[in-house]
Amino acid sequence: MRDFVVFKDVSKRYQMGQVTINAVDHINFSIGKGEFCIVVGPSGAGKTTVLNILGGMDSCSDGEITVDGTRISEFSPKELTKYRRYDVGFVFQFYNLVQNLTALENVELAAQICRDPMPAAEAIEGVGLSHRSNNFPSQLSGGEQQRVSIARALAKNPKLLLCDEPTGALDYVTGKSILKLLQDTCREKGVTVVVITHNTAITPMADHVIHIKNGTVEAEEFNEHPIPVEEIEW
Amino acid sequence: MVSAIRKDFIREIKNSRNRFLSIMVLAMLSVAFLSGLKATAPDMKGTGDDYLDQQKLLDVQILSTLGITEEDIDALQAREEIAYATGAYVIDAWSGDLVSKVYSITEGINELTVLEGRLPQNSRECVVDRNLVGELGLTVGDSLPILPGEDYEDSLRHEEFTIVGVVRSPYYICVERGSASIGSGTVIAYVYLPEDAFDMEVYTTAYLLVEGAMEMTAFYEEYDDAMEDVIDALEPFGEVRSKLRYDEIITEATEKIADAEVELADAKAEAEEELRDAERELRDARKELDDGWQEYNDGKKELEDAYPELMDAQQQIRDAERELIDGEAEYEDGLAQYLEGLKEYEDGEAQLDEGYYKLADGQKQLDQSREQFGLSANFTLAEAVAAVDGAKAQIEAGIAQCDAGIAEANAGIAQLDPLISQCEQAMQFLPPESEEYQQAAAQLPMLRQQKAAAEAGIAEATATKADLLNKQAQLASVDGQQLYAAKVELDAGWEEYYVNYEKLADAKAQLDDAEKELADGRKELDDGWQEYYDGKQELADGWADYDEGMEKLPEAYAELTDGEREYRKGYNEYIDGKAEAEEKIADAEEELADARRKVADIENGEWFILPRAYNPGYTGFGQDADRMANLATVFPIIFFLVAALVCLTTMTRMVEDHRTQIGLMKALGYNRWAISKKYLGYGLLPSLLGSVLGLAIGHLLFPSMIYIAYQIMYEMPDLQLRFYPDISISATLAAVGCTVGATLFACLATLMATPANLMRPRAPKPGKRVLLEYITPLWKRMSFNWKITTRNLLRYQKRFWMTIVGIGGCTALIIAGFGLRDSLLMTMQRQFGELFLHDVQLTLASGLLESERDELEEYLRQCGVVETYTEMHAANVTAESEDYSSISFLQVMQSDEIGDFIVLRGYDEPAPIVLNDEGVVIDQKLSELLNLSVGDSFVISGDGRQEVTVAAICENYVAHYIYMTPAYYEKVYGEEVEMNSLLLNLSDTSAETCDRIMTELLALHGVSAASPTSDTKDTYLSSMERVDFVVVIVILCAAALAIVVLYILSNINITERKRELATIKVLGFFDGEVSSYVTRENVVLTALGIAFGCALGKILHNYLVLSVEIDLMMFGRELMPMSYVWAAVLTALFATIVNIMAHRKMRTIDMVESLKSAE
């Protein structure tokens, strides 16, 4: 069941001049399909590297990664691009919307390269921003922008939704609503969501929490009954 | 902390090497281009000025219609604004077959540069132009015939000069040699002779060096103005001097006329005298002739009389001869008889003589014997016998006596000998002091003496005895009887001898008489002969005289008739001479009258005071330099504009990149100056470095390369590169100013913001709807990508415009460069391809004979290559309007013939123009220069000054042409036009055929020059290559600029949107899609830039063509479509290269970038 995403002995080493840094060191974990998984750890623990590797933005040095039965660890750059294009949705900490495109257009930008995209308007509606779909990012608040970002990721109908500190740049209330959106998406659409954060306070809302420290999995916990975001305080 | 800032600065440069280099290259290009083009003009002018100063080229020259005298020169020299004045001779002359200018060598002004050989040292040597050596194929050491033109006959002392050197005159700085009044009017070469080779009364020219002119730089307005002032000041002076010269000439002429009058009077008197003499001579001759006739007749008569006389004389001579011969025979007989007698006589005489000698001998013997015996002459027989016997006895007695004496002497000796030996012994043994010894010694000599006397007596006696014995022997045979008998016989012999002797003497007398008689006969005969011969000689002489006379008679007759004829001739001559003399006198009187009239007509002299601009090529050089200066104004402005925009963009970007850092610094408490120092420094450093590099390249490379191109046209020393602080400083200031200014501008806005504001990530530039979106049908049809592109383009408006201006500027520069080439090529193609249809222009010899013309026409018909030809009058003239004058070709042709050879069509609208009798057709450029339009009139000056009306304006590119019909010519000039040229169309224009035709044509007497159109074309083409070269430089620079600009802009575009690009990469865009996301924008920008550049290029080209055009040439002013295409293709190519580089760069963008916060 928990074999939608499998990390097996994955290592990532960076060569910084003379020094080799093991950002990720023989990490092993697996994530089940439709899980809401939070990867948590202090700064420099290697969680972003995990996200990069998982998101197909980077390749691992060692080990084996399987996503939905496909070994992406052996992908060529081009295959990785395809993987990102068709299978992964990204939500960035700083939203990374194209400033020159309206909310709707930003969604379209992602949708147009997909095989079976969700209509952009529907995606926008899904995040509750139909009324602002013709606004430019600069005209939107941070939360709204993050919603657009999520809509952009969801419009692709991804197998995997990767979120990098989605609330990092947001205030408490807005952050909460974004997390709620993600949680709802996971629940309602059955999309596997992986959220990376340093905020351990929000871990109770996840099905599966992976604690990473010094490039390895320090602990894993599974919540049989995740708590709805509204109930979490931090 | 200061060092930290410095470290930061250095690291900043290291980390942004490309940006730093880009700014440097931009500054370098701009500064190189500006300073290079700017420096070219002053470099050229400076080099020219140095050369001219060094050679002391005249500042002002004065030409005078009446010539310039030594006094004029002195007066000029005395003026304070004149540093140096000298007189010179300049004449137009034929050197070999070339039209040339012949100058006198001057010292201290117009000094020659000796290229080969040396300067002349005597009046038979010359130095020449390189052209002359080349054209005539002569070398130093050859001799050169120089024939002055009509106006200057006898102005040279010699007809041939030895070339001793090849020189360069500063008077001619360009390959043109100006014009002359002889031949085709185009000077081919110059020749310099020493002043004493000229034989002229006054100088033709005065050369002046102006005080202070040396310090000014020629070709600049300052110099020109100064010279203009000097010329203005000299004008009134010139009038005064001209008046003086005029008066002098008038006085001289008046004097001359007076002299001539006296001369005429003298001549008249002389002629009369001569005539009188001739008359007298004639009279004498008549008399002499008459005498001659008389003499002839007398002589004839005399001869007739002489004949019979001569015949008589001949008979007489013959008789005398016969007589003489008889006489001779008689004489011979006599002579023979005489000789016989003589012989007989001589025999007798010999016999007689013989007898005589015998008798004389006998007598002698007898006389001897007689004397011996002492007998008288008439002795008897007895006496004879006695005498003989006595003598015999006497001898016998003597003999006996002798014998006795001998015996006595021998006895004495025998006594003496013992005594002598006794004495000798005594002396031997006895002491000498003894008495005995003394006695012996005294006795001995005495004894010896006695003995010697005895011995002498013996010898004497012996001799006497011998003698006596001898006598005895003689007498032995003689006896007295015999002696007597001999005496008797002898006496009888004598008797007979005397009888014979008597007889012989008689015979001798007889013979002597006969001899005398014979000698007389002989003499008589000889005299007869002499007389005979004399007579004969006389006769022969008489005959000879006669014959001679007979012979001489016809001769004399002929002589006389000749004399008669001569006399008649002389008489006629006299009559003619008289008439002639009268006529001559009349002529002379007329001439004098003419001269008087002429003197009255002499116009006041005029000084033409001319600046250097009058020198061939001088103005052209300045203009060429100015043209470079013109180029230097437009091109670099565009360069700088582009560079400044790009710098602004770069620096803005840099400052924005450093927003947070600036905020931090501010927050840390650094003041604005400390913060902005870094950015200003960053702008300053590369622009300064680039400027220095650019200055080096610009000052060294550009002027040299451009000048090399110009050196084909100008005869100048190599370029002297100079450093121009003003240009350098202004160019550097411009480059540094642009960059630093842009930096400052970029900094200011940022520095104004509060630190807090700065520390926060800058609000991304908000997206905006573009106008296009409101045109819904269009917007809807655009693909999503294009929508993004459109919006992106318009979002970064600053970059949008900068890119368009940058790319447009480069395209414009390239277009202008290509356009210039187009213009040049079009000029050639139109002029020689479309307008000039003729292939050859022939200049006919002046004073062409009818036969030569026939020969030429025959050749043209026969040679098979000449399709058509027409006659034309061609001349070099100057077209003048109020403020401009230009050298032009005047061509006079029949309007119905011109069309086959020269196409006349309008420039603005290419409608054909028909040459009519109402005015001239001039070319477009001339009309612009002289500011003329149809119906205006202007002055043609050349052979006089004529005003003509412009009937039409035609298209023409090279040189200036004024076309008119012969009828109009006659109307304007008041005389019939003389056709001096032919235009030919060839059916075969290959080089070999052309060469052959040229050679054959030039061999004809009627042709003085033949120039194929292709030659003219080549000449212009070669001069155009100079400009072509500049074009290449422009294109290269533009290309370099284009690449740098595109690179920088694309680089900035990518850096600015790194995060955006990283994001779309994360979204799963393929590399190609990411590239095209940006490239699409670039393509559009490039396309728009090109379009903008095309428009700008057209304007730029227009401006450039006008500023590069020279007065003698109009360039094609249209741009070829291909130039646009080329410029577009080149720009697109650069853009593609840059896009490929951008693509590479985009591939390297790390997607992790998207995770970072916006800086």
Image (cartoon, rainbow, N blue to C red):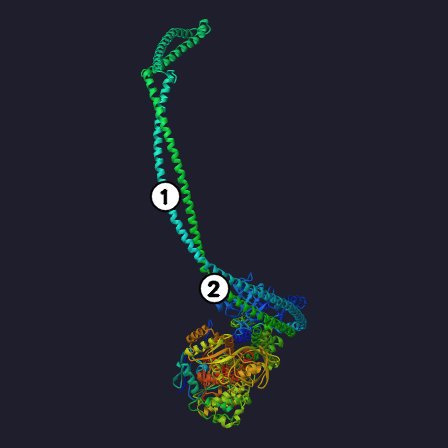
Q: Earlier in the sequence, mark 2 or mark 1?
A: 1
Whether residue B651 is visible to the viewer of this picture, yes or no, is no
Report in which chain the residue with disc 2 lies: B
Q: Which residue is mark 1?
A: B330
> Where does the image place residue A168, in percent across and percent down from the top left?
52, 84
Q: Which mark is residue B930?
A: none
| Residue B581 seen from this side | yes
The foreground one among B632 and A83 is B632
Kindly identify which residue carries mark 2: B558
**Residue A187 location, x and y as percent?**
46, 91
Neighbor class of circle 2 (other Cα within 10 Å; few <14, some 14-19, many 20+) is few
Residue type highlighted by circle 1? Glu
Examine the rendered structure and indicate whether residue B689 appears above or below residue A101: above
Report crowding for label 1: few under 14, some 14 to 19, many 20 or more residues within 10 A (C-alpha): few
Q: Chain of mark 1?
A: B
In the rendered image, the quadrant that contains the N terminus of chain B is bottom right
Q: Amino acid at mark 2?
A: Ala
Asked if the residues shown at circle 2 and circle 1 are in contact, with their CB atoms under 8 angstroms apart, the answer is no
Which of the 4 quarters of the picture holds residue B41?
bottom right
Q: Quadrant of residue B278?
A: bottom right
Q: CA distance from mark 2 to mark 1?
A: 56 Å
Residue B406 lies, in percent from the top left, at 36, 10
Residue placed most toward the observer, B198 or B372: B372
